[in-house]
Image (cartoon, rainbow, N blue to C red):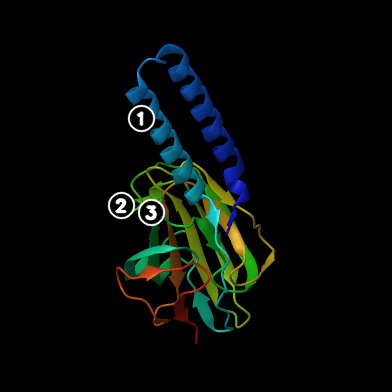
Amino acid sequence: MTIHKEGYTSIALTILFALILNALIEYYFADLAWLRWSVYVLSLALFLIVLQFFRNPKRTFTNGHNLVICPADGKVVVIEETEEGEYFKDKRLQVSIFMSPVNVHINRNPISGVVKFFKYHPGKYLAAWNPKSSTENERTTTVVEHANGTPVLFRQIAGALARRIVWYIKEGDHVTQAEQFGFIKFGSRVDIFLPVGTKVNLQLDQVVKGGITVLAELS
């Protein structure tokens, strides 16, 4: 396992904060051993929490020409037909994956293809499970066209804790299934929109792994 590049600054700031806090406690409360040890333990816990959030575990990814792979780790919270109003402007099959702060937060391409559309939207920070988060929160929208001509839309959505969405793609890029396309810091959600009638291999509340779990099969 390695640490993702998006975590370098956050980890460095956490270490700096812990060092300053512990130095102040040592200076002003040297005679209160219980307080000093409590701060030591809390500082270590904070460091470990931030460290695990930015972990980048080694994985053997799933690949398949007609397979749609889960773009993120987390739990399936939505499988339903809905109106996609930004790009398709028609009925689509929506699958949503909620990523808690303990999940790996790397986002991966669900299919290989060409990026036909990309847009970043500033917005609110509603809880990621709120239905309005898909249209009102800070988010990105990406549409990748599969080799068979099927467009697949996926959307990074910031949550109540997430304050920064990172992406590594742009319109016109050729992307490869399971490769990283972005990262969302501290709790979030990813929506994916497929043609109505697509065979979905997931169930509600199922725990999935980004780049590994098969989400659906394209016809």
At label 3, the amino acid type is Ser
Alpha-carbon distance for marks 3 and 1? 27 Å
Q: Does 40 sit above or below residue 25?
A: below
In the picture, the quarter occupied by the N terminus is bottom right
Q: Which residue is mark 2?
A: 130
Mark 3 against mark 1, which lies toward the viewer?
Answer: 1
Category of crowding for the residue at label 2, using alpha-carbon neighbours closer than 10 angstroms: few (below 14), some (14–19), many (at least 20): few
Q: Position of residue 151 (x, y in %)?
A: 55, 73
Q: Earlier in the sequence, mark 3 or mark 1?
A: 1
Mark 3 against mark 2, which lies toward the viewer?
Answer: 3
Please report the residue visible at 46 percent of the width from the left and 78 percent of the height from the top: 214
Local secondary structure at mark 3: loop
Outermost residue toward the top in this view: 28
At label 2, the amino acid type is Asn
Please report the residue visible at 53 percent of the width from the left and 60 percent of the height from the top: 107
Q: Which mark is residue 100?
A: 3
